[in-house]
Image (tube, rainbow, N blue to C red):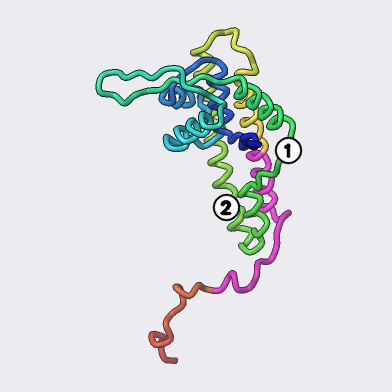
């Protein structure tokens, strides 16, 4: 008896593609354009290669299917895809899981902070201040993009259409505020520590070769 074909878990890009096709059929090039315009690539990494490989994988598992293939002039053929009933079911299940389940994402900042005591407090404070500047710049970019989107779209734009931007902005604001508070504590001496003695010793590149030392 043949075994049923196992459908692998959807990747973030797989969810995005199925979500686009749930609204209308389109070809991969158009998907890429919509992802850029809607700034979906703010919440996931999207490349030309991963987009096309994900489309092929979704088609191979029966979640999407081709409806037509066309060619304009000398351009390569473009295949238009539509979502299948199975694809809709898998999409909705994946969305429910993403919204409900909390999974650790192992942020790189937390990893760096775990070992920050190997550096001097002043240096850590300066590094975190630089990070806070970058976070503030990203926040400003979000606000500019949001304002531009609101101007281009209908005044009746629903809040849910931009709720992911609201979420990302909240995360960035929280990080910025935390960074400012911690750097203030380091600057004022409320947060301090003693780094290992070897941390302050010169690196091998900075040491003067024994043969070049001045004779005493």
**Residue 209, which numbered label?**
none
Identify the residue position indicated by label 2 in the image. Answer: 126
Q: Main secondary structure of the magenta part?
A: helix
Residue positioned 73% across, 54% down in the render? 190
- Left or right of 106 on screen, residue 25: left
Q: Position of residue 65 (x, y in %)?
A: 50, 23
Compared to residue 55, the image places residue 194 above or below, namely below
User: Magenta segment: does it hold 185?
Assistant: yes
Q: Image quarter for residue 76? A: top left
Answer above or below: position of 148 versus 10. above
Range drawn in magenta = 175-201
Depth check, front residue: 123 or 8 = 8
Task: Give me the C-alpha separation between circle 1 and circle 2.
Answer: 33 Å
Q: Is residue 173 visible?
A: no
Q: Is residue 156 above or below residue 93?
A: above
Relative side of 117 to 31, left or right = right
- How far across and down, in percent of the image, does residue 17 sit? 53, 26
- Whether residue 117 can be seen here: yes
Residue 194 located left or right of residue 74: right
| Secondary structure state at the residue bearing disc 1 | loop
Q: Indicate the quadrant where residue 74 lies.
A: top left
Q: Residue furthest bottom?
A: 216
Which of the image's four quarters has the C terminus?
A: bottom left
Query: Which residue occupies 35% across, 18% down?
Result: 70
Q: Quadrant of the N terminus?
A: top right
Is there a contact, CB below 8 Å, between mark 1 and mark 2?
no
Q: Position of residue 191 (x, y in %)?
A: 72, 55
Q: Which residue is mark 1?
A: 102
Task: Using the image as rendered, state which of residue 113 and residue 55 is in the foreground.
Answer: 55
Residue 34 colored magenta?
Answer: no
């Amino acid at each position: 008896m043949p075994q049923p074909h196992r459908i692998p878990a959807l990747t973030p890009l797989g969810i995005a593609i199925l979500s686009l096709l749930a609204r209308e059929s389109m070809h991969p090039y158009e998907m890429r354009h919509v992802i850029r315009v809607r700034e979906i690539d703010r919440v996931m990494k999207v490349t030309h290669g991963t987009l096309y490989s994900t489309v092929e994988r979704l088609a191979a598992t029966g979640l999407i299917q081709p409806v037509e293939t066309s060619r304009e002039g000398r351009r390569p053929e473009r295949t238009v895809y539509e979502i299948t009933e199975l694809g809709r079911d898998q999409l909705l299940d994946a969305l429910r899981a993403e919204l409900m389940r909390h999974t650790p994402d192992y942020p790189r900042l937390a990893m760096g902070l775990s070992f920050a005591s190997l550096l001097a407090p002043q240096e850590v404070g300066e590094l975190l201040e630089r990070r806070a500047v970058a976070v503030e710049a990203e926040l400003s970019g979000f606000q500019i993009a949001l304002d531009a989107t609101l101007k281009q779209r209908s005044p009746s734009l629903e809040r849910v259409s931009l709720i992911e931007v609201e979420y990302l902005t909240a995360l960035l604001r929280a990080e910025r505020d935390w960074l400012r508070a911690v750097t203030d504590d380091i600057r004022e001496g409320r947060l301090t520590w003693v780094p290992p003695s070897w941390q302050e010793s010169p690196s091998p590149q900075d040491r003067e070769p024994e043969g070049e030392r001045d004779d005493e």
